[in-house]
């Protein structure tokens, strides 16, 4: 069961990296003054909520696995708290994305920064999870 949780979240991490790559392409075009590539924007907007849901589900699946196997959720406290922080960041990215209205929106930079933090925290979380296996 642990491996399924790890595999699921690794795949979700890769989807977040892909989503970040799409967002970075959109950002570069906007900052260069280039016309936006509509297909990339649509893809970024379409998959963002789905990937958000996958990330949150990955956290709660880990919580349930630990709770049902160990009897309490703090058995792997560092991994749990890092996952909690990651989940809050994922939610923050989603909330910030909903505030973006129009090309000159002031919410774009916080959305970008929080998205970059999600990828960094996911990397740390994967490292902590792999350490738990050995």
Image (cartoon, grey):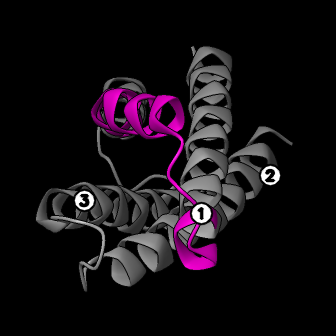
- The magenta stretch is 29-55
100 or 113: nearer the viewer: 100
26 or 69: nearer the viewer: 26
Secondary element type, mark 1: loop
Residue 16, percent from left and from top: 56, 43
The residue that mark 1 highlights is: 34
Q: Is residue 99 left or right of residue 31?
A: left
Q: Is residue 62 left or right of residue 76?
A: left
State whether the magenta stretch is mostly helix, strand or loop.
helix
The residue that mark 2 highlights is: 131
> Does residue 63 show up?
no
Mark whose residue sits in front, 1 or 3: 1
Quadrant in the picture for the N terminus:
top right
The residue that mark 3 highlights is: 97
Mark 1–mark 3 distance (CA, rounded to whole Å): 21 Å
> Does residue 13 show up?
yes
Q: Identify which residue is drawn at 60% across, 45% down.
A: 22
Residue 59 figure quarter: top left
Mark 3–mark 2 distance (CA, rounded to whole Å): 33 Å
Density class for disc 3 (Cα within 10 Å; few <14, some 14-19, many ≥20) is: some
């Amino acid at each position: 069961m642990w491996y399924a949780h790890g595999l699921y979240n690794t795949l979700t991490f890769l989807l977040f990296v892909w989503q970040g790559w799409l967002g970075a392409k959109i950002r570069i075009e906007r900052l260069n003054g280039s016309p936006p590539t509509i297909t990339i924007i649509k893809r970024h907007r379409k998959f963002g909520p789905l990937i958000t849901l996958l990330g949150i589900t990955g956290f709660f699946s880990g919580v349930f696995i630990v709770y049902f196997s160990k009897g309490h959720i703090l058995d792997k406290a560092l991994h749990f708290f890092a996952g909690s922080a990651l989940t809050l960041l994922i939610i923050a990215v989603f909330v910030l994305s909903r505030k973006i209205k129009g090309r000159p929106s002031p919410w774009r930079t916080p959305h970008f920064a929080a998205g970059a933090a999600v990828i960094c925290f996911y990397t740390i979380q994967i490292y902590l999870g792999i350490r738990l296996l050995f």
